[in-house]
Each structure stands twice: as C-alpha cells, then as structure tokens.
Image (cartoon, grey):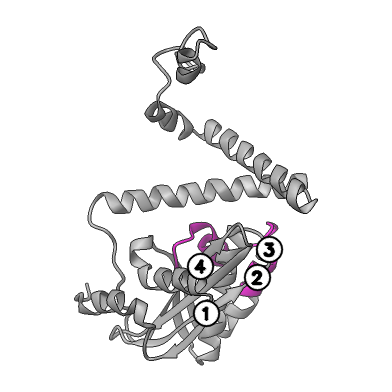
Amino acid sequence: MANLNVRRVAHSNKFPRCKVGGETLARLRRICLEPQCRLFVCGIWVLWLDRNKNLYERKSYSGIEAANYVKYFICELDGLTERKINTIGEKEKWKAPENPTIKINFDAYFDSMGYKSASAIVARNCNREIKISKSCLHTAVGTAFDVEAIACYEAILTGIDMGLTDVIVKGDSKSIINKCMTKSIDKSQISAHIRNIQKEKVRFQSIIFHFVPRSANQLAHIIATTSLKLKEMVYLIGKVSCYAKRQLKMEQLREPD
C-alpha cells in the first residue's frame, strides 16, 4: 500500500487489515506470524507453485496434495522459528553421543530448477571419530520435502549397511523428524518415503530421531551442498572430503558437554 500511495494509485498507505499505521515490511512480518495470516500466505504460495507446475509440466496438484503442502510449509516455518530461538543465544553445536551409540547426521540440498538433489550422511562415534561420510545424487526429485525424506532414508540404510544396532539419527528438517517419530500412518505426498523409513527402522535394537538446528548439522550440510555443486558422490570410511575437513576439525576440537 505504501508503494501504491507513492504512485498515487491508492489514497492511503495505512495497513488495510487494521487501518492503523503505515504498511511497512516489519509490520507485515509481524502480521504474517499470526496463524490465520500464515495459513493464507502458505496457501497463496502453493497456488503459485501449482500454477508453475501446470505451466511447465502440464500437471496440477489435487486438493489433498495442495492441503498437504500448506501443512508442510507451516511445519517448516515452525522449524525455522525454533532455529531462530536457538540462534539468539549461543548456537547449538554438534555433540558426541554416549558409547556405544553411533550418531548419524543427515542433510540434503535441493536444486529446484533442475529437480536434482544431494543427500549427505555422516556417522560418528562417542570419540567424535568419523565412521562413514557419504553423499548421493538424485534426479527427478519433486519437492524439498522429498529431498529431506530421501536423505533421512539414506541415513537409515547407511546404519543398516554398517551393521549398527544402536543409533541416533539427527537432521534439521523438523517436519521429517516428527514424521519419523510417529507410529501413525502417513498420508502426505511423501508417504512412500516415510513408509520406507518406518519399515526399516525396526531393524535396529535402538533408534532415536532428533531435530537439531543447522548449526549442529554443519558437516552434513557442507557435504550435501558441495556434492551437488561438484556433481559428485563420495563414500569415505574414517574421513571426510577435503572441503569438509575444516568443519570437522572445528567440531573435533570442541570439548564434549
């Protein structure tokens, strides 16, 4: 409204919802945090995605798919809010697991223009030693939600291939972690991935899923982003790629809490 007022298209620059005060970016952010407004904005965003999908792929979302997308966007916003709270004070850092548990961190990087992604897995023990670091490239990936779910599934398969029985799986996608922890049947657009995770996790004696902020998932994030940019997959035992060594050293030097 402020820009329209300057251009003499609108008669007033007051915020249209409450008619009090001018429309500013800060004020708009505060209003959009309200549940109803957030639902509306996410709905508009899904309609825009549907329009692009119809234009470039000749496909369209069903009503159920669109509703699920809105729910997932809201879950991701909740996750971003939690990350912001964690970064106000001291940032959360990677912590070593207790013996004999192996901690598996996963992350993913998505190229929305090319529908490609890379998933990264890093497994470490109580001494902060790397057991395995790996990355996988994926094509024809639909959404960012699929990307994170695929990465989580890769983490589960990695643990099985290593013959682990006691693991804790951590990622910075709150919606995916929540779905992995629940025992109810998932009916979202990523239900196939969640079913695969639920099916395979029973092969562990103990498995825990835990959400962490990006600051505690940096090593996996660096491997995922760099792998996609370089278009290369890695599978390393006991070490990480050269581009991730600096981050690994920082985390190894930090004393366990």
Count the numbered circles shown: 4
| Residue bearing mark 4 | 108
How far separated are the C-alphas under marks 4 and 3? Answer: 18 Å
Q: Residue furthest right?
A: 58
Going from the N terminus, do you reach mark 4 or mark 3 first? 4
Secondary structure type for disc 4: strand
Using residue 161 as the reference point, say whether residue 256 is left or right of it.
left
Magenta residues span 170-198
Q: Where 157 falls versus 27 (above or below)?
A: below
Which residue lies at the image location 47% right of the left edge and 71% below the top edge? 224
- Residues at circles 4 and 2 in contact by the CB criterion of under 8 Å: no
Pointer 3 or 1: first along the chain: 3
Q: Amino acid at mark 1?
A: Glu
Residue 61 shows in the view: no
Rounded to the nearest angstrom, the CA distance separating label 4 from label 2 is 13 Å
Foreground residue, 69 or 188?
69
Measure the C-alpha gap from mark 2 to mark 1: 13 Å
Instruction: Quote the CA–CA distance across marks 1 and 4.
Output: 14 Å
* Few, some or many residues within 10 Å of mark 2 (<14, 14–19, 20+): few
Q: Name the mark on residue 179.
A: none
In this rendering, the label closer to the viewer, 4 or 3: 4
The correct choice, above or below, for 16 with respect to 109 in the image is above
How dense is the environment of label 4, judged by Cα within 10 Å: few (below 14), some, or many (20 and up)?
many
**Mark drawn on residue 139:** 2
x and y percentages locating residue 93 in the rendered image: 29, 66
Q: Quadrant of residue 184?
A: bottom right
Amino acid on which disc 2 is placed: Thr
